[in-house]
Image (cartoon, helix red, strand yellow):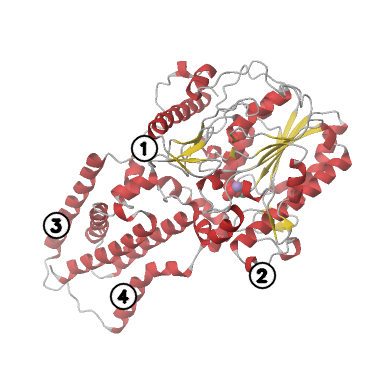
Amino acid sequence: MRFLAGRLQLFTIIVLIKILVVRTHIFSLTHQFPAALLELASLIVVFGLADVLSSRRGISKFLVVDFLLSTYLLSTVMYYNHFGRFLDYHAITQAPLLKDIGESVIAIFSFSYLFLYLDIFLIIIFLQIFKLPNISRGINLRKNKRKTLVICCSALALILVSYKVYQPKDIPMVLAQDVGILNAQLYQAFHSLRKEAPEDLPLDALHQANIERIKQINPVSWPKYFGAAKDKNLILIQLESTENFVVGLSVNGQEITPNLNKIIKESLYFPHFYAQIGQGNTSDAEFVTNTSIYPRPRGAISTGYTGVKYPSLPRLLQSKGYKAVTFHPNTATFWRRDNLYPCLGFDSYFDESFYQNEDPVGRWGSSDEILFKKAVPILQEFAKQNQKFYASLITLSSHHPYLIPESKKKLDLAPDLQNTFIGDYLTAINYEDFALGLFINDLKDTGLWDNSMIVIFGDHFGISKNEETDNQDFFTSILGREHDYLDALNVPLVIRIPGVKSKIIENVGGQIDILPTLANLFGIYLDDYLIFGQDIINQDRNLLGFRFYYPEGTYISSSYLYIPGNKVGQNIETHEAVQNIELFLKEEQQIKNLMQLSDIYLEYIKKNK
Ligand code: GP9
Ligand code: MN
């Protein structure tokens, strides 16, 4: 091969080595061949096309492609280390949000990642020292390009054939593992052109009884706690990145969440409660809890559907004379909440324009202290007018990368936790809890406490995959075992109802269950609602689905977690392996059916807006 084509080969091999290094980091070693061949094929296509399409004769076009691919690999590694998930096509489409989470991106960056650019750096230095001869002289460039094009087409054909042979699974990690991390993008981009839900909706299936049949639950005739919070106000507090392991935890002799622990002593507390967000993180948690509908398999729900009217908790309570408002100090355009909130039926929302960035924490917006403090007069005003209300408050200060200003730090950490990720996380949660404590005092001082049901729950995980691995010693010391997927899903749920005695309820539940659980407490029948969750006080059997961050079909039943592709389940109490693959496969199909029904319902709502 002439020198020009040799350069093409050289770059293909260099980037292939980088891909193989990344693959060994992300996937199990047993899955490297023949995927490596498909990785090679994809690189031949990319570098080949760059060669054929560019009229430049030098090496610069290959350097540019190498740089772009290295940046893609860097993003893949960083995303995996944080989310434990492959950076697939759908996640890439959310890249515009990166400008708002710069702090988090910097926090998870490591200089060792620059290894991915080492070759480019060395080649540029080499070129500065040794000038390359003009190698194109005497070469029939046109003929050479034709040859390259033929090789490119053959590589592309191999990739396309592999799709047919492998019948790739729609699980991003498995897809990328089997067909290659570049090919997976192509595959997903192609498939995302297909409609998300069938054109002709099987609407007959949209019945509550059908949902109950899939979940194998029966309606409860005489539900306990029915109407226990009748006509009370509802104050719903969604805690940012707050996992359940912090509840009751002490470090260095101090409780991390003293105020939450205190309120639990006079509340219903659900230790087996799980976050069910999709790609829309916080905003998906808001959607799921307010609708009892699953988030979409990909994409934030808030950005997907405009101008629709979801049957929702705000609308349910409005039908009983309530006003519904929601508070969050960031701009409502983030996650397009400005679109989501009217769809959910909130009468009004209070965002950055209300909080005016007063006392900011990080770049996100006002501190949790201000979030709560500025909400109180508005709630008091409702009370003054004898207006029942539903107020939702979404905390923010404990957002990754968990950097709380020195002046707000309350936790006195032992030296080994100071300036560590875990130390920062616990400090941020402790500050959030401090702000919650002040809010509870305000509610008591204003008399709102006596007339309100308080619901507190976590929005999603706070410990990423990488941080989980890096801090196993800490977790072993507090949990007696490693922090795992179950811990990442497990968030607290606390329901405090005036006059109702405290109780720990062991039933399994998820965010999708909040609406029906609260409806029962308010004594409101959900006859006109289609709900995918259930009243977790009264149902002791559950089937909860998880999407986007987990392969489709991942579920938690009443006693175990199952992730498709695994041969074993995991007991939610002991975290030990559970064997029963036949049952798991059956239930995997059931949860897929349930979530498909939820997707169909979303399409139905959208069409009938
Ligand atoms: C911003 C905040 C984002 O408004 O809610 O939280 P996230 O979705 O990144 O957890
Ligand atoms: Mn969040």
Closer to the eye: label 3 or 1: 1
Q: Quadrant for the C terminus, please.
A: top right
Where is residue 376 drawn, in percent x and y? 81, 42
Element type at mark 3: helix
Where is residue 274 drawn, in percent x and y? 58, 39
Closer to the eye: label 3 or 4: 4
Marks 4 & 1, CB-CB < 8 Å contact:
no
Residue that numbered label 4 is attached to: 123
Residue that numbered label 1 is attached to: 193
Question: Mark 3 and mark 4: span between their CA atoms?
Answer: 27 Å
Sequence-first tag of 3 and 2: 3
Residue that numbered label 2 is attached to: 415
In the rendered structure, the answer to whether residue 453 lies left or right of residue 127 reads right
Marks 2 & 1, CB-CB < 8 Å contact:
no
Where is residue 429 drawn, in percent x and y? 68, 53
Nearest the camera: 365 or 519? 519
Q: Which mark is residue 146?
A: 3
Sequence-first tag of 4 and 1: 4
Marks 2 & 4, CB-CB < 8 Å contact:
no
* Identity of the residue drawn at 33% across and 52% down: 181
In the rendered structure, the answer to whether residue 441 lies left or right of residue 554 reads right
Sequence-first tag of 2 and 4: 4
Question: Mark 3 and mark 1: span between their CA atoms?
Answer: 31 Å
